[in-house]
Every structure is written in C-alpha cells, then in structure tokens.
C-alpha cells in the first residue's frame, strides 16, 4: 500500500483565517502564470494590494472562495464569481471559475476536483447551472483538468502586445 491511500483530500469554503495561505498560494499562481503569459498579473490577476483583494473576495456575496486540503492542510484555492447574463437571460447567471491553484507537490491527487465540486455546489445552491473556467493558453494541465470535468472551450481570447517587456517596464510584480 502507498501513503496516498491514507491521505484525506477535501475542500471547504475559505474563511478569513485562511488569508495568509491564500496570499502565499496566490503568489505562486501569479509566478506560474507569469511564466506562461507575462501579461497575466496585469490583465487576469488580482488588483494590488492582493491581500486586500483576497479579503474582499471572502466577503463578496457573488464570490465563492474555496480552499483544498490534504489531511486538513491547505494546499490549494479556487475563486469563482457569479456573473449575470445579458437579456433576454438577464435573470440567469454563470458561475465563472476565475482562479484555481494547487501546490505543485499536491497535484494529481484530487484536490482540484474537490475544490471544483464545492464551488459548483455553492453556485448551484444559488440557482446557477452554467459554468465557465478561465485557462491560460499553453496551460495544458489546467485545460485537461477542466475538460475532464465536462467543460468545453466556448471562446478564445486573442492578444497582441507591442510592448517590449511588460514586467521590465513595471517591475517584477508577482
């Protein structure tokens, strides 16, 4: 038998007490995404100060913030936002998974699936039955994860930049 059989993987709604871990993991997510797409921290990341942005997300009624755990140790997080559709479906919403991250050493054991399950259940309790997930181009692991959960691409964002180096112009924001 392997040690993996004895791990307890789970997920729960995040609380204010999780803020330090959320901040740590957000920094790792931002660095991972910046390597894939240097514009990510400025276009898709959280506004500065990140700690305040994360704190506000915990309090927003339209947000779902989830932490993933192994043996009650926080190893991942997910941020989802409820977004209204346009008329004639303006009375309906989409649950949009904006951010998802699992510590590298904790990947592949079900933490992401547990977090996604909690987030979708929270949205479904609110009557939301449509879901989106943001995935960076080239992040094959994230794309495969969401596809294995029943998601399909419905749009692709095209980007062009004439800037020489975004990070060099504005410092190296994590």
Image (cartoon, helix red, strand yellow):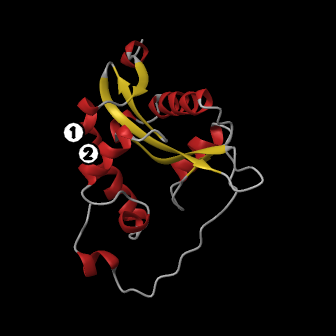
Task: Measuring from the top left, give residue 43's x and y in whole percent.
Answer: 43, 67
Q: Is residue 81 above or below residue 75?
A: below
Alpha carbon distance from label 1 to label 2: 5 Å
Q: Which mark is residue 23?
A: 2
Mark 2 crowd level (few <14, some 14–19, many ≥20, 10 Å Cα): some
Find residue 172 and report its image quarter. bottom left
Mark 1 crowd level (few <14, some 14–19, many ≥20, 10 Å Cα): few
Residue found at x 25% / y 77%: 170
Q: Are marks 1 and 2 in contact (CB under 8 Å)?
A: yes
- SS class, disc 1: helix
Task: Measuring from the top left, give residue 151's x and y in whole percent.
Answer: 66, 44
**In the drawing, does residue 139 fall left or right of residue 154?**
left
Residue found at x 47% / y 31%: 115
Q: Which mark is residue 42?
A: none
Q: Is residue 96 above or below residue 120?
A: below
- SS class, disc 2: helix
All told, the count of numbered labels is 2
The residue pinned by badge 1 equals 20
């Amino acid at each position: 038998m392997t040690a993996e059989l004895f791990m307890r993987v789970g997920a729960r709604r995040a609380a204010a007490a999780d803020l330090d871990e959320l901040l740590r993991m957000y920094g790792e997510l931002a660095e991972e995404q910046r390597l894939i797409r240097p514009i990510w921290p400025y276009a898709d990341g959280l506004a500065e100060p990140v700690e305040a942005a994360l704190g506000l997300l915990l309090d927003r009624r339209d947000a779902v913030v989830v932490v993933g755990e192994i043996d009650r140790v926080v190893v991942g997080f997910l941020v989802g936002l409820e977004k209204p559709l346009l008329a004639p479906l303006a009375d309906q919403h989409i649950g949009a998974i904006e951010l998802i991250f699992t510590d590298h050493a904790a990947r592949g054991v079900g933490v992401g699936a547990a977090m996604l399950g909690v987030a979708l259940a929270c949205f479904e309790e609110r009557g939301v039955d449509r879901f989106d997930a943001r995935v960076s181009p080239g992040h094959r692991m994230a794309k495969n994860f969401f596809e294995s959960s029943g998601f399909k691409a419905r749009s692709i964002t095209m980007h062009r930049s004439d800037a020489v180096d975004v990070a060099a112009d504005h410092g190296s924001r994590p």
